[in-house]
Amino acid sequence: AHEGILRRQSLRESAARTYARSLPIVPVRARGLTIEGADGRRYLDCLSGAGTLALGHNHPVVLEAIKKVLDSGAPLHVLDLATPVKDAFTTELFHTLPRQLADDARIQFCGPAGTDAVEAALKLVRTATGRSGLLAFTGAYHGMTAGALDASGGAPDVRVTRLPYPHGYRCPFGVGGERGAELAARWTENLLDDPKGGVTTPAGMIVEPVQGEGGVIPAPDAWMRRMRKITEARSIPLIADEVQTGVGRTGAFWAVEHSGVVPDVMVLSKAIGGSLPLAVIVYRSSLDAWQPGAHAGTFRGNQLAMAAGAATLAHVRENRLAERAATLGARIMGRLQGLAAAHPGIGDVRGRGLMIGVELVDPDSTAPDAVVPPPAPALAAAVQRACLDRGLIVELGGRHNAVVRLLPPLTVTDEQVTAVLDRFADALAAAER
Ligand code: PMP
């Protein structure tokens, strides 16, 4: 079955298929961190549905919540009508939000994907401000629909002004650290204040508190607070894209909590649906300039996703899994930094909580004036393959696809973390040979 399924997929599916290309496995069963393939092999899954599975695969509380809806006779599809399931989800979500936002927030169900919620956020701030431009950042990823692509830099559009995102390792200013972030913030201020800079006051600024697809780049807290100040002073709504960073992943329930920044809009998806498709925006009620029907869509009320999501949010909150993510993340980073000291092919280890990246570089071909060695996408791909050979699923990211990303579920055990790190170390050694 295994080979046949892979062959038919490669024949029938679009050339755009991505994960399936680098991860030729056929999952048939899964639990927690573990996936079992049709070939009988078992894998430790550190991709977690691109950060979706906060509780891992098929967590009992998620399955229970889904079964409860199925057994209750409740309708599975009711557009955006009020239901007890939706009410429970919204109540639980608001319970977790930063207080200052939750006290005065509106929610718009979008969906089903993160990119739909990004579109809704962009549309909302354009309606509310009557302006059209958008501030977004280098290396950003917000989705694959047209507006989200603009914000990601995939389809450049004159309405989008791209600002430098602070990158501690590949710092655009060549200095890294807090100083590099400070220079990035000043660059932004200068541009916005330059009457001839070509940037009229935009409708909003969209930022990931930790860039995920961009190569796991955590923004310094001080820089996030600067972005809040810069936008506040100019009445520019600040949109935090927490599609990947949300629900405990970075060691806080929401990544904006690290800096204390209260955004005007939060874009949420992935883990909030407990492994089923769900996407929402929450925003200050003062931005709610929409007329009835201004934002619609058939699939904005997936009852199973709301039930699975409410159970996930409650489980993460009640079991303090964000704190656990912080602890485990520190342990993983420590071991990876040890590996980096012994492997010149590791240029940088970075992350926050259980959102971790290892950037692979080519130390032998550093240009004389370069601050850091060039990225090594071929080595990264070899590490990914070697990981898969050892039963470990990891994904690559970053502008040059040279960053190995580790996104284990927040429920990963200490023993599993050790197994993941052992396999990774072994794969790295094999890939470098
Ligand atoms: N925003 C961020 C920060 C993301 O990481 C992603 C997906 N990786 C998206 C938006 C888009 O979500 P989706 O793939 O569900 O459309």
Image: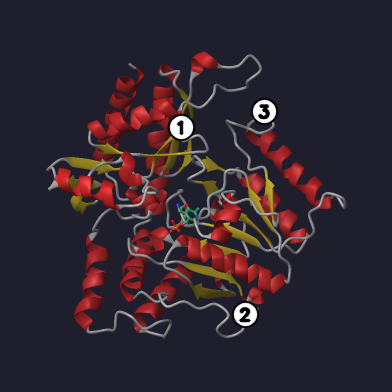
Q: Is residue 273 left or right of residue 148?
A: left
- Circle 1: is it few (<14), some (14-19), or many (20+) Cα within 10 Å? many
Residue at which label 3 appears = 174
Q: Is mark 2 within 8 Å of ligand 1?
A: no
The residue that appears at 31% across and 45% down in the rendered structure is 20
Q: Is residue 416 left or right of residue 18?
A: left
Q: In the rendered structure, which disc, 1 or 2, sits on the residue that comes first in sequence?
A: 2
Q: Is residue 411 shown to the viewer in this render?
A: yes
Residue at which label 1 appears = 402
Looking at the image, what colour scheme do you see? secondary structure
Residue lying furthest right: 195
Q: In the rendered structure, which disc, 1 or 3, sits on the residue that comes first in sequence?
A: 3
The answer to which image quadrant residue 228 occupies is bottom right
The answer to which image quadrant residue 407 occupies is top left
User: Which label lies toward us, 2 or 3?
Assistant: 2
* Image disc number at residue 141: none
The type of residue carrying mark 2 is Trp
In space, the residues marked 1 and 2 are separated at their CA atoms by 42 Å
The residue that appears at 43% across and 82% down in the rendered structure is 80
Quadrant the C terminus occupies:
top left
Q: Is residue 265 left or right of residue 82?
A: right
